[in-house]
Image (tube, rainbow, N blue to C red):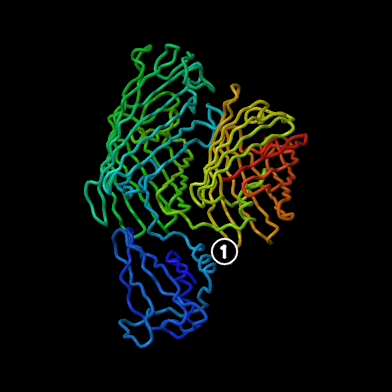
Amino acid sequence: MPSKPWLGAAVLLAAVCSGAAYAQPNWQVLPQGQTKAGNPAQPSWQPLSPGSSDAAKPSQPQWTPLLPPAHGSGAAPVLWQPVAPGEKQSLPPPSGQTPKRQPPTSQAEAEALINGLGPPAGSYTTLIRLGQLPTANGLETGNDQIIFQQVSPFGGGSAGGSGNQNYLLRGDFSLNETLQISAYYTYADDPLYNAPASKPNNPGNLWTIYGGALKGRLAGGKAWQWAAEGALELFSVGSGCGGQGKSCTGGELGNANIFNDSGQKVWTRNIVGSLALPLSWQATKQLQLSFVPAVSWLPSSQGSNQGGAGEFFGTNISLGVGANYRPNAQVQLFGSAMVPLGPGNNSFDSNLVYSRTPILSLGTNLAVNPRIGLEASITNGFGLSPSTAILALPSSPWQPMLSGRFTWTPGAPDSKSPNYTARQASLALGGLSVNTALTPANGSKQFGLNVDSRGNVFGFGGVSVSNDFQFQVAAGQFNGISPQNNFISTYEGSGNRNLRFGGKAMVMRPTKGLPIWTGGRISVGRNYQASSYQGYLFFESMNTWEATPWLAFTLNPKLAYSGLGTPWGVGISANIQLGKSFQLIPEINAVATELGGTNGTNGSLDLRWLANQKTTVDLYVSNAAGLLDMGQLLGNSQVRIGTKVTVTF
């Protein structure tokens, strides 16, 4: 059998457990392998030629380990290899190595074993931020990160829609082992969460930030680290612009702003900055504690040349504390608190009274693999840049909010390829209104176009940046939804244009004990109809079971979170292979709410033609309002006939 030095730890598991088929060998110590996090390097293996001195049965290959190149530093336990009969035994054999099964007998078996194992624990990095609080941890060289984050209240408040959302796009880049540089952009444009009683209407509120930060390690060792992070930002502040539902992006005049009684918009650009000195201590192998003194330089007033100066936040010195508990390589639980000490303030209420409010965060970070990280937390912190991280939600400082963060580390190790069969690769295309859990393999690109008989038109694009994750963007226009109600017209009304961004992650692959694929998908975006301009968050969980080589079932709970309500339901589908080139896909979405009307529950029947390895064509009938996100949870009184073409390359 040809040599495969990358077969790795899966074959180690098989070989160690397989000695029932051959005589118990002696053992000798291999040189120690190391990883940066102190975890043992996983040995690679290659088969011995039949008839060699170490092979007990010439007809069946045995295996010997090859140590991969070490990287980083840290202690590692002893690794072992068998020695030929008759050679001197340098150390006793390791205990507990009772063989239980045969070694792999083919390359295919060995590859199947290794694909069942995830990346080594040492390839997962610790958090460099705990919510809004920075830690002293830095990026490893080559592990640059791209981050997208959104924070939003659980209700719309006076702002309506899905509430006061703030968005962040950030890049962190490692210059060397001790220095990293960051660039970021944040955007929030909703009216205030609580309308000020002293104003004739709820003022629009715009915060945008362009900024950069530099973070460097000052001192430390294995047990503790001390670092400094400085930031410089352009903070644009707009207040006014016509109130409810109006953004501050144009030259509009409004009836109220929060700074003076001019009846006009106040618009200012401010140079702001911050400095943090985080100290992080590795208290135990699983627990890290951080202590962070910091200062943020923000303006103390706005609008001095636009109708009169009004109070703003000012300079704040703060003390932060945080904890990060890591029960295993892929899960990290964290909490943090930032306490402003003044002399300025970091919040104001619906009476426009400024005060100091602690910023609290509690959340969980899940690494799908070392390349893809997903995070969710509860916080009252609204600012997403280093200089504004100390700020609470404008007009409602104690309002709990949901923060979602996605982290992509392109240079980190990926999960092993799932080695899809042709059938599984077709399942990774998803369904129509019921999604599947499988994701296209790393590097795959997809484009799709969907039209139906009542005028819906949608386009889709996807890029797989990991074997377990696909970036997605979708856009289109809804038409012909009947009957209408306030909820439907706000989000999916006729002529309404929607733009959605998101991603799909495969979080679990089949095992002998649990033979299902499990994944999750999240998307954000809004309706760009001038009369609405409202956004919502869509989340779904997918669980796919291959019952037979020709039959697969999917269970697909889903919800759409918005300021007008949260429709939710459960999708159920089957994928039936009809010969080599066709599949029949029946689907139903059982909707639990009537926000979309009494016709919320809907069904579809799809005939899929696998035209070739790159192209599929769907022909379907459905009474769903549409195939795009919330459209799956809204019914339609009339049946649509549609087609969808998908190209993969």
Q: Residues within 10 Å of mark 1 (few under 14, many from 20)?
A: few
Q: Is residue 126 left or right of residue 615?
A: left
- The mark total stands at 1
Residue 339 percent across, percent down from the top left: 33, 39
- Placement of the C terminus among the 4 image quadrants: top right
Q: Which one is nearer the viewer's eye here, 562 or 21? A: 21
Dot 1 amino acid type: Thr
Residue at the right extreme, as displayed: 638
Residue at the left extreme, as displayed: 219
Which corner quadrant of the image does residue 277 belong to?
A: top left
Name the residue at 42% across, 21% down.
238
Q: Is residue 523 left or right of residue 181?
A: right
Name the residue at 69% across, 34% down.
451
Residue 166 percent across, percent down from the top left: 46, 33
Residue 192 percent across, percent down from the top left: 48, 26
Residue carrying label 1: 511
Please determine whether, in this image, residue 454 is positioned above or below residue 221.
Answer: above
Name the residue at 43% across, 81% down.
52
Please determine whether, in this image, residue 498 is positioned above or below residue 255.
Answer: below
Q: Is residue 266 left or right of residue 487?
A: left
Q: Secondary structure at mark 1?
A: loop
Residue 509 percent across, percent down from the top left: 55, 58
Residue at the bottom extreme, as displayed: 86
Which corner quadrant of the image does residue 270 belong to?
A: top left
Q: Which one is nearer the viewer's eye here, 286 or 178? A: 178
Please determine whether, in this image, residue 291 is positioned above or below residue 553.
Answer: above
